[in-house]
Image: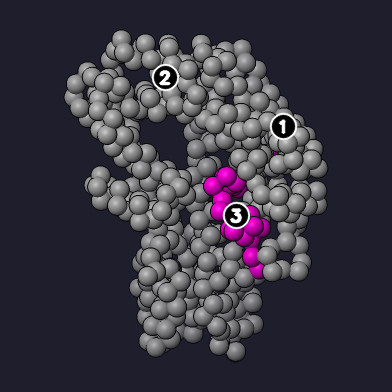
């Protein structure tokens, strides 16, 4: 059974009923949410500046043809990919449209897999555009550094990040899980000359080994790899210590030559990018143990930053907790928060092995217990199943909110099977459509 991914629709426009039906079926069987239209005017009504999908259109149609539709779509948003379908007589016209910004053209007759492959590439391109627009908006509104804390070590870390960001060189970030390594990577990107360009994050530890190479390097037919997608911007490789030896070898060439060869391709593509790699283990120890390539380590280890664990800067815990309590209050709409003795004791006595992420989770749980239970009971005093259920629902809502209601993106964040997520959505009464921009 094919499950349609509905967060990115494909508008397929063709006045030929049989061809429209056949092509729509091919796209649907590939798991693509296709919306067929018999004329350009009807399809154009679906295109807005926040449209998340792509358009595929035949060139020759009555009233408004494919080229006119192309110009109308570009006027709404020039970064919406549009693929043109051409007859033999229209190939020269389609090539000119390609120079003018069309994403691709398919000369008739074409195989179904060529149609699907081109559509998937266009959808991924559009997804990256949307993600980077949100990133730019977040950078413009970010204000103060999200690396919170007035301890000497954090003040110094922020100063070093500001200096390195301007230098635009590769950086290796080491730190325990939950300590804020991705925040460091984002600051290096946002404060440097590449801000406004793509920031592509890859969790190497979450990539299935069988898919790691195609995800990173792409393929010559249907997939733009994450390395190529970061061209011009920053590639953040999280948990690089989990990367397999085979992928390490291919990554070394990318770092040395600044070029990537998609699977199945014979010609490499040049890439201009900055690499920020992060490891939860000390990479030198991984090299000594034979689990990480020595040459790749030295290529990454141009500049090394260490993010301190929370136990080394305990004086920052109250400030962190206050920040996350306010974030939780804003999100759930609670009127206020009362610090209870049990919460205070936990803040002072707990070792915080999960670092900043654990403080954030604790703050949200504490606020939710007030907002949802309507009582001053601390989250530590509630039954464990109730605490787990509430926190699970919160994490799902956060994933949907950060991804604009995209189930596919939420699955990537939560790292659970699709069926499991849909079961949890039903159990908690959560609708992804409630988190999509109107």
Residue positioned 43% across, 12% down in the render:
349
Question: How far is the residue under mark 3 from the one under mark 1?
Answer: 23 Å
Tell me where residue 104 appears, x and y as whole percent: 59, 72
Tell me which segment is drawn in magenta.
193-220
Label total for image:
3
- Please name the residue that numbered disc 2 is placed on: 321
Q: Earlier in the sequence, mark 3 or mark 2?
A: 3
Question: How far is the residue under mark 3 from the one under mark 2?
Answer: 37 Å
User: Does 96 sit above or below residue 294?
Assistant: below
Q: Which mark is residue 294?
A: none
Tell me where residue 119 appears, x and y as whole percent: 52, 69
Residue 212 seen anywhere in this rendered image of the structure: yes
Question: How far is the residue under mark 1 from the one under mark 2?
Answer: 33 Å
User: Does 409 sit above or below residue 311?
Assistant: below
Mark 2: which secondary structure? helix
Q: Nearest the camera: 255 or 190?
A: 255
Q: Residue furthest front?
A: 289
Q: Earlier in the sequence, mark 1 or mark 2?
A: 1
Q: How busy is the neighbourhood of tag 3: few (under 14 within 10 Å), some, or many (20 plus)?
A: some
| CB-based contact (under 8 Å), mark 3 and mark 1 | no
Quadrant in which residue 301 is drawn: top right
- Please name the residue that numbered disc 1 is placed on: 285
Residue positioned 64% across, 75% down in the render:
96
Mark 3: which secondary structure? helix
Mark 1: which secondary structure? helix
Q: Tell whether 395 sits left or right of 87.
A: left
């Amino acid at each position: 059974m094919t499950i349609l991914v509905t967060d990115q629709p494909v508008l397929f426009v063709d006045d030929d009923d049989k061809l429209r039906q056949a092509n729509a079926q091919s796209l649907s069987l590939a798991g693509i949410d296709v919306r067929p239209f018999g004329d350009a005017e009807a399809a154009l009504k679906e295109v807005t500046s926040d449209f998340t999908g792509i358009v595929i259109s035949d060139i020759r149609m009555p009233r408004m043809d494919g080229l006119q539709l192309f110009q109308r779509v570009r006027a709404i948003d020039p970064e919406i990919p549009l693929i043109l379908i051409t007859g033999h007589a229209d190939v020269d016209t389609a090539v000119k449209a390609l120079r003018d910004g069309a994403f691709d053209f398919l000369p008739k007759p074409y195989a179904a897999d060529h149609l699907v492959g081109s559509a998937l590439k266009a959808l991924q391109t559009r997804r990256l555009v949307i993600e980077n627009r949100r990133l730019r908006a977040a950078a413009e509104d970010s204000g103060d550094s999200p690396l919170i804390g007035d301890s000497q070590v954090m003040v110094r870390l922020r100063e070093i990040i500001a200096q390195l960001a301007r230098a635009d060189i590769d950086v290796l970030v080491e730190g325990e899980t939950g300590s804020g390594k991705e925040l460091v990577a984002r600051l290096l990107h946002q404060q440097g000359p590449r801000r406004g360009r793509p920031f592509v994050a890859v969790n190497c530890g979450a990539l299935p080994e069988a898919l790691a190479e195609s995800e990173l390097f792409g393929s010559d037919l249907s997939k733009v790899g994450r390395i190529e997608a970061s061209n011009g911007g920053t590639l953040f490789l999280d948990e690089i210590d989990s990367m397999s030896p085979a992928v390490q070898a291919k990554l070394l060439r990318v770092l040395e030559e600044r070029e990537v060869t998609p699977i199945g391709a014979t010609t490499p593509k040049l890439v201009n990018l900055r690499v920020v790699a992060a490891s939860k283990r000390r990479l030198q120890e991984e090299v000594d143990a034979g689990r990480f390539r020595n040459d790749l380590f030295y290529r990454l280890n141009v500049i090394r930053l260490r993010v301190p664990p929370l136990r080394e800067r305990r004086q920052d815990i109250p400030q962190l907790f206050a920040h996350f309590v306010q974030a939780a209050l804003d999100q759930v709409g609670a009127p206020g928060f009362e610090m209870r003795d049990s919460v205070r004791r936990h803040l002072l006595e707990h070792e915080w092995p999960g670092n900043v992420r654990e403080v954030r989770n604790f703050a949200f749980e504490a606020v939710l217990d007030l907002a949802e239970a309507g009582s001053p009971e601390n989250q530590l005093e509630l039954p464990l199943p109730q605490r787990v259920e509430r926190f699970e629902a919160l994490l799902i809502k956060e994933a949907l909110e950060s991804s604009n209601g995209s189930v596919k993106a939420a699955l990537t964040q939560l790292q659970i099977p699709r069926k499991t997520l849909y079961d949890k959505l039903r159990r908690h009464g959560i609708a992804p459509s409630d988190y999509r921009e109107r």
